[in-house]
Image (cartoon, helix red, strand yellow):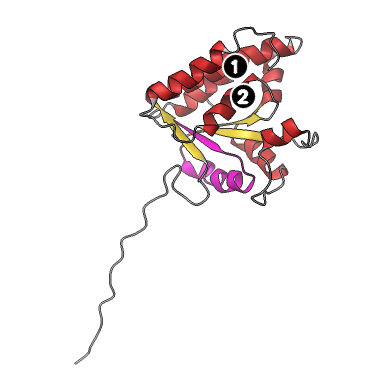
């Protein structure tokens, strides 16, 4: 008579969710009204930064100087950035302290659409961004996340947008959002007060930030 031990069945691991994996420790997810406030604020700061820089350059070229647009461009810039050893300053902190590398643009944060399909297109970004100490901001709007991101840079869709560390108005509002790591979809009043304070403090387009 055979004495066989039945192997215990283990449930398969659940797929990682934004902000839950080891490489996604510095992530935020925005959806609903909080997402609308976030994108509205960034759009306003794009206009402020554009006014400060002047309008000598065509808008399309200027936008490419401020953002890495698309998964491929975001990936290329991340790969060019040196890996962080955990003690390095963030890209924006390095820029403020004067330690930025002009030959290698630094990304302050990455806006990433949660509705990317197929998902393998962006599967590598969380670990790559984490190794460079670049936070991820997930944009969740059912199947319209990429459409909402595209509106920021005057395109039909954009799966990923890397925000370059330039020390401008866009960087300042993004830094404030990143510093409030407890923001979530239920903290509408907190998001609103944060963005209102930033907007009121920068009403004059020509004001140096």
Q: CA distance from mark 1 to mark 2?
A: 9 Å
Q: Which mark is residue 99?
A: none
Residue 72 falls inside the magenta stretch? no
Q: Tell me what residue is drawn at x 37 percent, y 57 percent.
A: 13
User: Is 127 situated left or right of 87 in this image?
Assistant: left
Q: Earlier in the sequence, mark 1 or mark 2?
A: 1
Q: Position of residue 31 (x, y in %)?
A: 40, 28
Q: Quadrant of residue 187?
A: top left
Q: Quadrant of residue 192?
A: top left
Q: Where residue 106 sits in the image (x, y, percent)? A: 70, 35
- Quarter of the C terminus within the rendering: top right
Residue under the point 57% across and 34% down:
110
Quadrant where the N terminus sits is: bottom left
Residue beneath disc 1:
45
Q: Is residue 125 magenta?
A: yes
Classed neighbour count for the residue bearing mark 1: other residues with Cα under 10 Å, few (<14), some (14–19), many (≥20): many
Residue 88 percent coordinates (x, y): 68, 46
Q: Give, as a single range, the part of the protein colored magenta.
A: 114-139
Q: Which mark is residue 172?
A: 2
Question: Considering depth in this image, is 17 or 184 the residue closer to the camera?
Answer: 184
- Residue sitting nearer the eye, 120 or 44: 44
Can residue 69 be seen from the camera position used here?
no
Look at the numbered disc 1 and give the secondary structure of its residue. Answer: helix
Task: State left or right for residue 79 relative to residue 102.
Answer: left
């Amino acid at each position: 008579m055979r004495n066989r031990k039945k192997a215990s069945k283990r449930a398969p691991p659940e797929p990682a969710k934004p902000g839950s994996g080891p490489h996604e420790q510095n992530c935020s997810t925005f959806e609903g009204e909080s997402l609308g406030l976030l994108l509205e604020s960034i759009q306003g700061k794009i206009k402020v930064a554009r006014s400060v820089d002047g309008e000598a350059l065509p808008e399309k070229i200027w936008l490419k100087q401020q953002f890495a647009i698309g998964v491929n461009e975001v990936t290329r810039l991340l790969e060019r950035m040196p890996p962080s050893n955990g003690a390095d300053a963030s890209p924006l902190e390095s820029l403020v302290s004067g330690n930025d590398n002009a030959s290698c643009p630094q990304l302050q944060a990455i806006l990433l659409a949660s509705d990317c399909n197929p998902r393998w297109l962006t599967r590598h970004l969380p670990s790559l961004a984490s190794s460079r100490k670049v936070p991820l901001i997930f944009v969740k709007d059912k199947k319209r996340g990429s459409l909402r991101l595209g509106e920021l840079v005057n395109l039909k869709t954009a799966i990923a947008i890397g925000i370059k560390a330039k020390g401008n108005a866009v960087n300042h509002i993004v830094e404030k959002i990143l510093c409030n790591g407890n923001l979530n979809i239920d903290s509408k009043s907190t998001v609103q007060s944060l963005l209102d304070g930033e907007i009121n403090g920068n009403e004059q387009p020509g004001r140096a930030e």
